[in-house]
Image: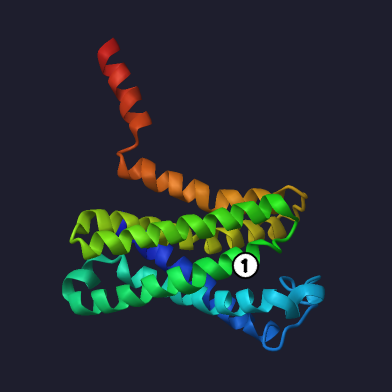
Amino acid sequence: MQTVLRLLAGLLVLRVTVAVVLGYHDYFPPNFESDFLQGRADYFWGGYQWAFYPHIVSGPVSLILGTILIGDRFRKRFPQWHRYLGRIQVACVLLVVTPSGLGMAWHAETGAIAGAGFGLLAIVTGVCVTCGWRSAVQRRFAEHRRWMWRTYVLLCSAVVVRMIGGLATVTDFDAPWLYPLAAWASWLVPLLAFELNRLGNPFIRAIRGSISCSS
């Protein structure tokens, strides 16, 4: 079941990544009538373009690399390639995805709440990938895998945001609070789910323990 779920998640990430890349025709040159760039013409040619273009290129690259690198089979079969691609991934996330994400967060759609969500996401992603790199250098590989899994979960927030937006479009739901909520929920909820799964879901264990004690 875990293998099937990982396969489905990988296919979903790939589908969203392809959709993002196919949308590049709206960005080269920028089409300010397209969904994402609408209303951004006034400030796009300032500092925003220097965050936007690196982000839309490095984001899909980091997602694809992350999907490859988290696989145990790939790591065991191609350890040298795992190390080589891992260095590229760390550089991509730390030097491009994180700073460009922070730059774009200043102009997040709907304002400061969404901007704070995306800005903190960029910072936490940078912290996680840095910790993952340090633990690998220090040969603490179990710890390294946990940090890189966190990094991958955070990178997948781009997929979750688009899923939320797609669901809202299909159901014709348009509330002013939806995008700010998505800016936070897209990474906090998956990260919480990852930590609960890593810990064996302590809430379920506590419930089972209380049932055992009462019986």
The answer to whether residue 37 is above or below residue 165 is: below
Question: Measuring 39% from the left and 74% from the top, which residue is drawn there?
Answer: 91
**Residue topped by disc 1:** 103
Query: Residue 109's spot in the image, x, y percent?
Result: 73, 60
Query: Residue 156's spot in the image, x, y percent?
Result: 48, 62
Residue flagged by tag 1: what amino acid is it? Gly
Which sits in the foreground, 38 or 17?
A: 38
Question: Measuring 47% from the left and 68% from the top, which residue is drawn there?
Answer: 13
Left or right side of 63 for 43: right
Q: Is residue 184 visible?
A: yes
How dense is the environment of label 1, judged by Cα within 10 Å: few (below 14), some, or many (20 and up)?
many
Count up the numbered dots.
1
Left or right side of 151 for 187: right
The answer to whether residue 138 is above or below residue 57 is: above
Query: Residue 186's spot in the image, x, y percent?
Result: 55, 53
Please tell me in which quadrant of the rendered image residue 144 appears. bottom left
Which sits in the foreground, 196 or 95?
A: 95
Q: Quadrant of the C terminus?
A: top left
Query: Residue 118's spot in the image, x, y percent?
Result: 60, 57
**Circle 1 — which element?**
helix
Q: Is residue 215 visible?
A: no
Question: Measuring 74% from the left and 55% from the top, which residue is drawn there?
Answer: 111
The answer to whether residue 167 is above or below residue 94 is: above
Which sits in the foreground, 57 or 78?
A: 57
Q: Quadrant of the N terminus?
A: bottom left
